[in-house]
Structures are given as structure tokens and as C-alpha cells.
Image (tube, rainbow, N blue to C red):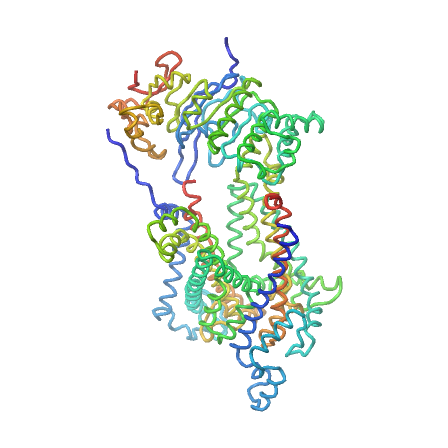
Amino acid sequence: MSEEKLLEIRNLQVQFNTDRGAVTAVKGVDLDVYRGKTLGIVGESGSGKSVTALSIMRLIPDPPGKIIEGHIKFKGENLLDISLSDMRKIRGNKIAMIFQEPMTSLNPVFTVGNQIMEVLDLHQSHLSKKQKIAKCIESLDLVGIPAPEKRIKEYPHQLSGGMRQRVMIAMALACEPDILIADEPTTALDVTIQAQILELMNSLKEKMGMGIIFITHDLGVVAEMCDEVAVMYCGKIIEESDVFTIFKHPMHPYTKGLMESIPSFDSTGIEAKSRLKTIEGMVPSLFDLPKGCNFQDRCSEVTDECRGIKGPPVLEDLVAGHKAACFNPLK
Amino acid sequence: MNLYVYTLRRLLYIIPVLLGVCAIVFFLFSVVSPDPTLIMLGKHASVQQMEELRRELGLDRPWFIQYLDIVKSAFTFDFGRSWSTKQEISTMIKQGAIPSLTLSLPAFVISFVISITVSLMVAFYRGKFLDKIAVFGCVSMMSISSLAYILFGQWFFGYKLGWFEISGYDYGFPDFIPYVLLPILIWVILGLGPEVRFYRTVLLDEIYQDYVRTARAKGLGEHVILFKHVLKNALIPIITNLIISIPFLILGALLLESFFSIPGLGAMTLNAVNASDFPVIKAMTILTSVAYIIFSVITDICYTLVDPRVRLR
Amino acid sequence: MAAVEQQSKSLWQHAMGTLFRDKMAVVSIIIILFYVIMAALSATGIIVADWTEEVGPSYGPPSMDNWFGLDMFGRSVLAKTIKGTEVAMSVGLIASLLSLVIGVTLGAIAGYFGGRVDEFIVWFYTTFTSIPNIMLLVAITFISGKGLKAVILALGLTGWVGLCRLIRGEVMRHKDREYVHAASAIGAGNYRKLVRHILPNVTHIMIINFSLQFQIAIKSEVILSYLGLGVQGRPSWGIMIDDAKLELARGVWWQLAAATFAMAIVVLAFNILGDSLRDALDPKLKGK
């Protein structure tokens, strides 16, 4: 069974101009997104995952940011080549995005209904007003908001965080997009609400046949939501595979470190009493990257090869369907 | 809380503030200030004459009574007569109000329109060269003394070019127009710097908010985002700021009226201060204070009406 | 394998770094220092001690010998302008410090203790604000006997309200923060909590406000001196502008130009510095 490939990203490079010089936040990222599948992008803050997502929507603020290399092909068409007005026809329509902070992501002075209508006015202007209002109510219903006819007249501050995130999802899905990009959508929410939202997203993916890009730093969420996982570090993808393989057999020492740092509840005996595991050291500043592999100063498997003679390691298929960028991958 | 109760409570606040204002006015002009009889009668006045005048003006009464007098006039708006011109102060105020308004009202409106237009442009082109020049321009304009603007304006536009009248005033529409044109122009220029800077800051604060990113992600164009999403939010602090500056229009512009010999309330006040004309000073101060409190309450009410977050609890 | 430890920079180090990388800010600081030095040199008589000397004809225009021309008494306008920096700098410095002390003290007390004390202080500054500033200034200067000290006093006693409000707001927010509760838990008293723990967190507001008050003070002094309430008997930019009123009709523009220019440069420098300080010190912007 082959799924439709919706998005193809090759060699994406994004540069930012800061007062301390130019810094490349995303260095040569390759990704594929398929219909009906969820791709997870995992990494710490500053790893470049959000920048990658914003690049797909061409939402990188310019200045100071710029996409300097690569192509992003949506159903065969390179999004980086089309005009800005054509891009706007795709935003919110074919590709939609939801963000981390539901509290601040909605405009406080307009009603919820008004904001959902806006998307429909933009992209589905052939519908009559009545039809659009019906669709608004339908969207809110779809995301599980009770009494949607009343809700559309309410303002964002009258809703709880979980409700607001549902509204965001409703707004994003109003035009039935092909791809949904979710940038840490549940990070700011309560754990119980988080579970509800994730469940909602999964069921909607099934129902609407979307491809989802799910960005997070929370491995628990990855395990629940994602089919494929790409791990990013310092602007590069350092490991990529399906979710089971990543968890069971991580090859890159960084990925292994991430897996090991998840505290385990069901260990007993000696393990239960030992310290929490961390990855030693800190993420290097993007202004001051070491030669060779970016992870060398924190890596348990580091050798001279990693320190720069050959340059940084390249992401390649070390095993079928499992890529890693490492000179000394774990077996 | 019920809006009416809230408004009432805030309006009642006028009372303690007014008492405080009266106290400050009293303290400054009765307790600390030099004896006005000296100024009024001149150096050669005899002790007897001074005593007489003091009694006439009621300056020999105990301080407590004098203070209460001030408070009484504050609440009844009966300010008595000016010591310099001997006129009824309420008459003077009525006469002076019109010229002041013919200057301050148009200046206020024109200033706002120009400033908001410029700041919208600057906000749209933020980060680009236009923006940087505009900010530097505003700050530079703010660094030049208002006196310099007035003097230069009078000299250049009035004297050298002869386009405008330099001083004087004519009552009645449209006779007063040539006399207020130059001061209005200067007022607008003086206000441009700080206003554009303030509006720009407010607009940019909103532009960098998350909801703007959401709006872009929905596919909205930059124009719509600025004029629909950003402006509506930005208008909240802008309007509140605008309303609270209205009471200060009463005094017109003290300096402008003085320089351009416009017989408004500002010039009247300045003359009174120079002449130690206590009743007039007292009257103008109290008037402005009352207006200030009333307008700050109006500002609060407007705020609750405009911002849905405050309106509905 | 060595784990590389990175030192995290403190707010001040980060601020200094950002500030000195900002070229405009550095230029502004240099300009301000220049004015301060000029004022000091002038006050101690090392330069322009002879400003009263008649060096040419009355109202002599700018020339190679006298860059800014001469005034009515044939005195060098350049010399007077430099002498005027003494007034400007001293007014700016002392008045702003006075406002700072009053504003921070009242604001901190109001914000920290709340209740009646807060109500009183709020009432106090509301009363102050409702009286038009220029009237208070003129009034206080007038009854304090005019002159430099009167101007400084007036400016100091009227310029504290804005800072007071800001500090009050900040202290109120910090009061309930966890680090203050933590300090209580180790037995810190009110004074200690306020001064040693909370106030350092509002220092950036104080600094930014100080630089802005400085230039407001300079501008206000000019207006007060123009109104005849400022320094007597020694040159100040305000008096020079006052003189210019009559001079302009005779085509004598150089005194107005010199005073305006001298003031505009230093005020501009303070404005730019204030903005740069805000960018550098605002902890919310750190890391952006």
C-alpha cells in the first residue's frame, strides 16, 4: 500500500541575521510527509524544529530570517518558488498550522466565530454567509466543543486553554487542509487536557485523511502520536526512522540519551533508586559550533573522527528505513 | 461590579483628590509664597496700606479658614475676582475658553490624524530604512526645545515669509483663522515626535503578538492584518491615551498662547502666575484637576467598553 | 570525554554586551561624557573662565575667530554655550536623582505595604498629576526664590510621579513571587526583602527612567529660564533663547542656534541611550 506523498523537503537551509552575525538555524533538512501519517519532529529548544515548520508555511520573518537553500514541494509544486499571494491561498487552506500558546494565539478583541469565519471568507468565498456560519458551527462541533452556536459569539478569554486549542484546531481544519502542522500544541496544556487534544487530533487525521507534522520535545507524546520520527539537533536531523525503531533501537547517542532520560515508573530494585539520567553538557551555541559533529562534546561514543577531520557526519541509511548521522552509531 | 456603581465610586474620588489639590495650592501660595501685597502695591507701600490690603483680600484670617475658602470655591465654582484685572473670574474663564479651543481643538484633531497615519506607515515598513529614519526623526524632533520651534516658526514663517500672523487674535469665525494657523502648525510639529513614537510602539507591540502569526498562518495579507487585527487591539491604549490628554486642552498651550498673544486660558494662567494673582491661579488649577479626574473616569469607562476582556467577566 | 560547561551570563553582563555592541548607544555615551567633562572644566574655571570678556563688536556674526558669533555685549556665544552646560548638567543630574529617590521610595513603600499606605500614596500622586505640570514647576520655582537651586528643587519635586507608578506596579508584582516567599522562609524581614531582594529587580527601570528624566529636566530648565525663573547672572541655554526673542528681528540668529543645537545634541543622546538601555536591560527581551 503506498500512501500519497504530500510534502517533500530537500536540503532546507534557513539563515538568521543577528547583531552578532549570520547564523544558520536549519542546515540541510530532508523530510517527507505522507497522507494519513504523522511525522514527529523531536528536539530541544533551538534545535531548529519550529523554524523548519514555519519555513513550510513561509512564515519566517524576513528580516531577520531567510530560506537560503532547498526546496519544499507540496504535491509536486515548490512552495518556495510561488508568489506570496499564491502562498497565502495555500495557508490556512491546504496547509494549516496550530501553535503552542492557545492563550495568546487568538485575537482577544474578536469573537471566536468571527475568527473562524475569516478563514472561510478567505478560502471558501463561494459559500453563502449562511453556509459559512453553518460550517463554523460544524467545525466547533467536530472538535468537541459543546453548544457551538453559543460559542461562536464568545471571546477567546471566555474559554479555557483546552477549549481555545480546540478552537485553533477547528480554525485550522475549517477548509479541510491536506497537511496540519502542529507546533507543540499541547505543551502549554494540562496533562489531562493534553490527552484529550491528542486523541482528537488522531481521530481527525483518520476522518479527514490529513498528513500531520507534529513538533514536540515530549517523547511520551511522540510515542502516542507519531508514525515516523525525525530527531533534530543544532539545526540538523541526526536520526530518522519509524517510531518503534527509534524507541527500541536508537542508533545515535543523542537519541539514546533522550530515551534514557525518560524517568521510568516501573523499574524496581537498584534501578528505581538510582539518579535520573541526563545528557552531560549543554547544547552548543549556534555561533560557536565545533568542527565536525555538533554532539562531540557530550557524546559517550566520541572518537577523533568526530572531531573534524572528515567534517560533520552525514545522515544516511545505516539500516533500511533507519537513518542516522553518526560516525559511531550504536548497534 | 456594576458599571454604574463603579463609575460612581470613581467619581466620588474627586472629593479627596480635590481636597488634596486645594491643600497643595493653599500650601504653595499662602504658606510658602511671598506676600502678594508687596507685589501688588509695590515697594513704596506703607505698612498700613499693606495691612489694609491684606484684610481686604482676607489674608489675615487664620490658615484654616483660608483653606476652607479655597475648598468652598472649588466645589461651588465661585472663584471671586482676579486680583490683577478685578474681573469676575468666571467671566474671564468664559471669555478665555473660546480662543483656547480654537487653537487646541483643531490642533488636537489634526495632530492625531497625521500622527496615526505616519505611525501606521512606519509600522507597516518596520525594520526597513523608512522605519529607522522615522524613529530617529521623531527622537530628534523631540530633542529640540519647544521654544526654538516657536521662535523659529514665528521668525521664519511669520516674519521672513509673511505667510502667517505672528501675534494677536480676532474673535469670531472665520476671522480667527489666520491667527491660529501658525500656532496650530507648531503644535502639530511639537506633538508629532512623541505621538508617532508612542503609536508606533503600541502598534509594534501588537504586531509581534502570537495572534498576528496565527492570522498570517490563515493566509491573511499584511494590509488586512495591520488594519483589522492589529489596529483594533492597538486602539485600546491609543484611545485611552487620547482621552486622558483632553483635560489638558483646557489650558490650551501656555507657551503658544503667550508667544502668539492669543487671549486664551493658557495666557491668562501664565499672566496670573507672573503677577501672583492667586484667585486666578487657584481657579485654573482646580478646574484642570476636576477635568482630569472626570476624564480619567471616562477613560476607564471607555476602556471597559472597548476591550472585551474587561467588559465581560 | 569532557563535558563543556558554558557560563550563563548574568543580566548585567548580557546588558553591557548588548549595549556596547549598539553603535548608537556608544556614540550617545561618548557625547554625554563630553558634555559632562565640558561642564566640569567650565565649572572649575579651567576653560571659558573669561566668558564675560568682550571680544568683539556687539552682535558680531559667526566667524573664524568666533564660531558661534557674539552676543549683545560682544561676548563669545561659544563661551556662553559651554558655560551653559554647567547649568544643564547639574540640573539634569541633581533633579533626576531627587526624582529618583522620591519616586523609588514612595513607589516601593506603596507597592510593598499595600493597604492604607498604598491608598495614601496613590491619592498623593493622583493629586499631583491632576495639577498641570508646568504650573507646578512655575509655582515651586517662583516661591523658592528663582535661580538654579529653585529650578532643581522644582524639577525634582515634580518628576517623580511616573517612576513612582512604575516601581509601585513592579514591586506589587514581585511581592507575591516565590523568591520573596523563599526569603521570608529563611527569616528575612520587610526591609531586607524589599531592599535586598525586590529592588535589584527593578534597577533597570530606575536606570532607564533616570536617563529619560535627565533630558526632560534639561528641556524644562530651558523653559523655566526663558520664563525668567531660572538661573540669574550666569549663562544658561534658556536665557540665551530668551535673548534670542528680540535678536531674531535684527537678523541675529546665532545665539538661538547655538543654544538649541547644544541642547538638542545632549537631549538626543539621552533619548537614544534611554532606548538602547531599554533594549539591553529589559529582562523580557533577553535572549530574543
* Residue occupying the far right of the picture: B173
User: Does residue A167 sit above or below B175 in this rendering?
Assistant: above
* Residue occupying the far top of the picture: A1
The picture quadrant where one finds residue B37 is: bottom right
Q: Residue at x 58, y 88 (%)?
A: B51
- Residue C267 makes an appearance in the image: no
Would residue B17 be found to the left or right of residue A272 on screen?
right
Q: Residue at x 49, y 71 (%)?
A: C230
Q: Position of residue A67 (x, y in %)?
A: 47, 29
In the image shown, does C77 or A315 lie closer to the viewer? A315
* Quadrant occupied by the C terminus of chain A: top left
Q: Position of residue C206 (x, y in %)?
A: 42, 56
The picture quadrant where one finds residue C10 is: top left
* Residue occupying the far front of the picture: A269
User: Does residue A326 sit above or below C265 in this rendering?
Assistant: above
- Residue A95 makes an appearance in the image: yes
The picture quadrant where one finds residue C106 is: bottom left
Would residue A250 be found to the left or right of residue B188 on screen?
left
User: Does residue A243 sit above or below B257 in this rendering?
Assistant: above
Would residue A91 be found to the left or right of residue A268 on screen?
right
Q: Position of residue B58 (x, y in %)?
A: 61, 82
User: Count the marks: how many?
Assistant: 0
Q: Position of residue C286 (x, y in %)?
A: 41, 43
User: Does residue B12 sit above or below C286 in this rendering?
Assistant: below
